[in-house]
Image: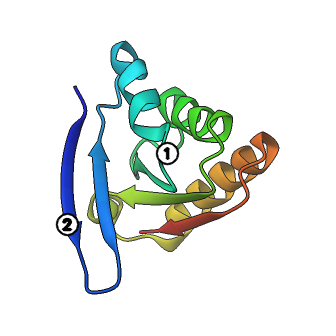
Amino acid sequence: DVAYRYFATPRRRFILADTPGHVQYTRNMVTGASTAELTVILVDARNGVVEQTRRHAAIAALLRVPHVVLAVNKMDLVDYREPVFAAIAEEFTAYATELGVPEVTAIP
């Protein structure tokens, strides 16, 4: 199921659609991304870019989500090593570029 959270700032209103990432819930990811202006793709620093990461990037590209944030999680479990983050960001950005994603911002 897609869990929606609503919040606002003085300048904007936001709807956050939290969708499960597992393959059996792919349709929920599509539902959440269908009206999105930004998607956050979460990657475990220990595992890097995996099939699920690629699937989510492909869905975002297919639905033409204009902004993608790559959030590299669990950096503490790789001793905050910058080369680990850089390799994940580079691999994902290259893949997203192949898919035609116009903007990727990677954050640890």
Picture mark count:
2
Disc 1 crowd, CA 10 A, few/some/many (<14, 14-19, 20+): some
Closer to the camera in the image, 83 or 5: 5
Disc 2 crowd, CA 10 A, few/some/many (<14, 14-19, 20+): few
Q: Which residue: 67% across, 63% down?
A: 103
Between the residue at mark 2 and the residue at mark 1, the CA separation in whole angstroms equals: 31 Å
Q: Residue 93: where, in percent of width, then height?
A: 68, 55
Q: Residue 99: where, in percent of width, then height?
A: 76, 40
Question: From the viewer's perspective, is residue 61 above or below residue 81?
Answer: above
- Location of the N terminus by quadrant is top left
SS under mark 2: strand
| Residue at the farthest bottom position | 10
| Residue at the farthest top position | 24
Marked residue nearer the N-terminal end (2 or 1): 2
Q: Which residue is mark 2?
A: 7
Q: Residue 50: where, in percent of width, then height?
A: 52, 33
Q: Quadrant of residue 23?
A: top left
Say what amino acid the circle numbered 2 marks. Answer: Phe
Closer to the camera in the image, 29 or 80: 29
Query: Is disc 2 in contact with disc 1, using a CB cutoff of under 8 Å?
Result: no
Say what amino acid the circle numbered 1 marks. Answer: Gly
Q: Please, which colouring scheme is shown?
A: rainbow
Q: Residue 11: where, in percent of width, then height?
A: 34, 84
Q: Left or right: 50 with respect to 17?
A: right
- Location of the C terminus by quadrant is bottom left
Q: Which residue is mark 1?
A: 48
**Viewer-side label of 2, 1:** 2
Q: Which residue: 81% across, 43% down?
A: 98
Question: From the viewer's perspective, is residue 23 above or below residue 41?
Answer: above
Question: From the viewer's perspective, is residue 43 above or below residue 19?
Answer: below
Q: Left or right: 76 with respect to 52?
A: left
Q: Which residue: 67% across, 33% down?
A: 62
